[in-house]
Amino acid sequence: MMDYMQRLGRSLMLPVAVLPAAAILLGVGAWIGEFSWGEDTVVSAFMSAAGESIIDNMGVLFALGVALGLSKDKDGSAALSGLVAFLVITTVLSSETVAELTHTNIDAVNPAFEVIQNQFIGILSGVIASIMYNRFSHVQLPAALAFFSGKRLVPIVTAATMLFLSAVLFFIWPFIYNALVTFGTWISQLDFIGAGLYGFFNRLLIPTGLHHALNSVFWFDVAGINDIGNYWDGKGELGITGRYQAGFFPIMMFGVPAAALAMYHTAHASKKKQIGSLMLAAGFAAFLTGVTEPLEFAFMFVAPFLFVVHAALTGLSLAIAAFFQWTAGFSFSAGLLDFFLSFPLEMANQPYMLLIQGLVFGAIYYFLFRFLIVKFNLTTPGREPEGESLDMSDSSDGNLIGDENKLAVMAATIYKGLGGDDNVLSVDNCITRLRIEVKDMEQVNQAEIKSTGIPGINIVSDHNIQVVVGTQVQFVADEIEKIRRSK
């Protein structure tokens, strides 16, 4: 199960890598629009639209990425099936379709169906599509239906499966959504403790996308709180209005970037270059715009314990800010841009204290994350428990630098050492290593594989082996796939 979750986490890295740039575009566009000279300008609208085109479609990005990443041979038809799965379930369970199915006015449809295009549905669609691909991509139908055999069959089977799943969620989804709204209304009555509980569950629900349902209770006028609207309109009580926003600033501006730094420092040496670029982009996006999903999705599945710690620290931050009645607000998210704009507003109460709190939380995040990652050997980006004993220094890449022919020779030698077509069941790769499933480990010739100059081999189980290649692993994996397809 843990191995599958790690594969799921790696599958999300492809779409997650797109999000920091989108977050910066959206944040800067919203910031420009807040000024009188920037309101309704082409620049603001252009940048906001560019960012929204990606951020608002995280669900479909995850459907594509997960389906591709979890498929056994990373074929494009798996990604297509992920898209089909997402389109089927989100269309069947859209407010318009539900209104038609139930013969009611669209205004009477449960608001749960207005947020059906979320990250949870995207991940679920990708998982289902990958299962269907791995199961049916090589199925041969009778001659009369031969055109729909193999990979062409996968989207069809996926669509049928999602229809069944949609029928199940038609009854379950409103219950889940309404339960969250009821829960949110209850904890809003618990003063600063309630603010802390809200912050905790807000982060904890990020993987499902259902944090939006919880947010609506506190930020908007679902239960009469309307924290964002009242803060920006100057209504409410000083020190109280804004309590469901203020505690996010220390986390998003300081805590999350500090966590990114901790994960970079604990990554294996051979992976620091790749991980560093991702962490820098994600950390900067969090600090500037308050968008933390690019970083959170990078570790929430591969190190779920750490994500729970992150949720707990978020809750603690909101509780502290609410207890001392330090308030600031945001119209987009809790980043530097919104903090700067909300600082002089009427409902702002000692907002500068949130910066001090942020520095403290930044230190806590960095040292606590670094300690937990090392102490429990958590699989944050750039780390894998089974490979810690291996030599993964950057010097290993010196044996790999060369033209395509050299990589092709290396791939052929490794594939032969693994036992070739008779023994290799599947080939996958992460940032620096090949992940291979074999029929019989006894047929693997480790000496022949090591003759290529690779830094190490790791036997994971009786049927799973990892070959540490280095940062050019993707090109070696591509060459092996060419060999497999040519047979």
Image: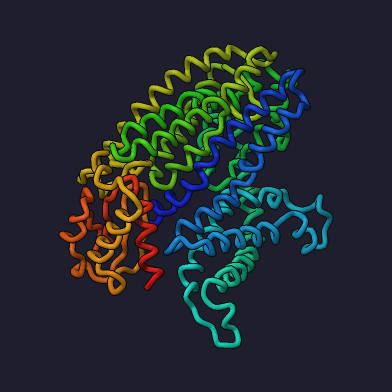
Q: Residue at x 76, y 18 (%)?
A: 36
Coloration of the structure image: rainbow
337 lies above or below 435? above
Give whichever of 36, 449 is nearer the camera: 449
**Name of the residue lying farthest toward the left:** 447
418 displayed left or right of 295: left
Give whichever of 198, 74 is nearer the camera: 74
Q: Is the C terminus in the top left, top right, bottom left or bottom right quadrant?
A: bottom left
Q: Which image quadrant is residue 335 in?
A: top right
9 lies above or below 144? above
Residue 234 at x, y = what percent?
Answer: 73, 18
72 displayed left or right of 142: left
269 lies above or below 462? above
User: Is any atom of residue 2 visible in this view?
Assistant: no
**Name of the residue lying farthest toward the bottom:** 143
Q: Residue at x 43, y 47 (%)?
A: 301
Residue 274 at x, y = what percent?
Answer: 39, 39
User: Is any atom of residue 436 visible in this view?
Assistant: yes
Residue 190 at x, y = what percent?
Answer: 58, 30
Q: Is the N terminus in the top left, top right, bottom left or bottom right quadrant?
A: bottom left
Q: In the rendered picture of this protein, how many numbered marks are placed on residues?
A: 0
Q: Residue at x 57, y 63 (%)?
A: 81
Q: Residue at x 84, y 55 (%)?
A: 105
